Amino acid sequence: MKKNYLEVAKFEYLKTIKKKSFWLATLFLPLFIGVIGLVSGLSSVEAAKQVEKPTSFSKIFIYDPQTVINPAFFVAPYESTTNVEASKEMVKADKSVVLVTLSDNYYNDLTSTFYYRKDADFIGTANLPSVINAFVKQSAISGISNPGVINILNGKPTSTSYTYDEKGTLKKEGFEKYLLPIASMVVFFMSVYISSGFMLQSVSAEKENRMIETILSIVDKKSLMFGKMLGLMGVMFTQLSTWLIFGFGIYKVVMSKFSLPIPIDFNNIDLSLLPLNIFLIFMGFLFFAAIMIGTGAVGTGAEDSRNLSSIFIILSIFPMYLMQILLISPNGPLSIALSYFPFTSFMVLLIRNSFGALPTVELIIGICTSIIYVVVAMFLALKLFELGCLMFNRRPSFKELIGYLRIKKNIQ
């Protein structure tokens, strides 16, 4: 049997990674993220240029009846005006000229009015209110004699957070607190929902085109099922490795090109939580892979199997709708209940562990129940595979499944 399922695993692995569609789907995600990162970087650079050159207008007339703005601030393109009507005529004649009028009671109502031609620069007119507000604010700040107040109004506040753990140890907190949970959830989704989907596609497609009959004449059902699982596990690692390599490369290129600051101290990441996260991701993959095998075997075809699998996918992503509750009360009754429900346990335990909110007793129970769920899922998947893979045009009924399990039990 060992040789058989290794041969099946090798065949399944090579069959999948040789497909152009696999590499197109695998490379699309990092390339898409890279394009988004590049566009975001260029947008940030362009925004910085706009800050340095806040307006594209050649002349900005400002009517200031209360002398709110310091006269020293009126340098090109800003120009003070007392004749509103004459300024409006200049606006009508030139689309690069705008008029801003401050109200007669600006100190109280902070109201201003803008006049420009309809064909004026769209971006420039959209940014004009914020530009004028900043202009007026800087003028007001210039009248303050206290440098500390000026620094408070102009400066960008920074903050640092520290937390005490249950042992009373002081630890610095930052964005890195969320890095491990986010990374773990991303890997979990990719490995469980995307990669285990290959399992459903493989079984249902072979059953639909009746290729599975030929395969079962060469290898036994158990070798075929576990071989597929092992081979597609290799596909999962290939896919994740590709994403990791491309992701790291894109990160280095974007950072070197745009020098975007990321406030992460990698030394503060608690790597002691990583082994259990990896275990839960691996168990989650095995559990849902087994579910997909059973679903693919009992479905009448690829489309029917996908419809059946959607039920289990909805159950598995249900914790995402309760994420706020899980984060606010990670040890509450709902969090604990979802930690031991088969289809949600892997994700909820992963979330709670990533934030260090999983007590030791629940950690041990979680490991044990995860193993039990995987073993049960494997057993049921094998039985469904044995019963359903040779049934065409109809699903095995629940009664047939129970009867099949009883027969197998009596034979054993």
Image (spheres, rainbow, N blue to C red):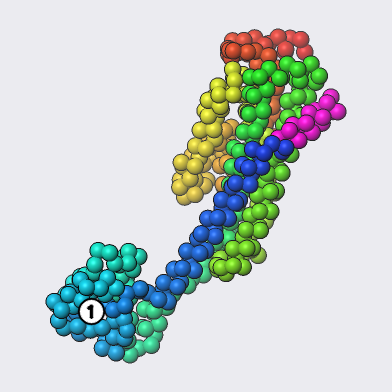
Q: Quadrant of residue 394?
A: top right
* Residue 123 appearing in the image: yes
Q: Is residue 39 left or right of residue 193?
A: left
Residue tagged by mark 1? 62
From the top left corner, tell me how far across and down residue 267 is, in percent. Answer: 65, 65
Q: Is residue 282 magenta?
A: no
From the top left corner, tell me how far across and down residue 60 is, in percent. Answer: 27, 78
> Which stretch did the figure color magenta?
1-16
From the top left corner, tell me how far across and down residue 272 is, in percent. Answer: 68, 54
Q: At 50% across and 60% down in the image, what residue appears?
A: 40
Q: Quadrant of residue 133?
A: bottom left
Badge 1 density bin: few <14, some 14–19, many ≥20, Cα 10 Å: many
* Residue 163 appearing in the image: no
The amino acid sitting under disc 1 is Ile
- Decide: is 401 above or below 137: above
Q: At 68% across and 17% down in the image, what residue appears?
A: 210
Q: At 61% across and 19% down in the image, what residue appears?
A: 298
Q: Main secondary structure of the magenta part?
A: helix
SS state under label 1: strand
Q: Is residue 62 left or right of residue 4?
A: left
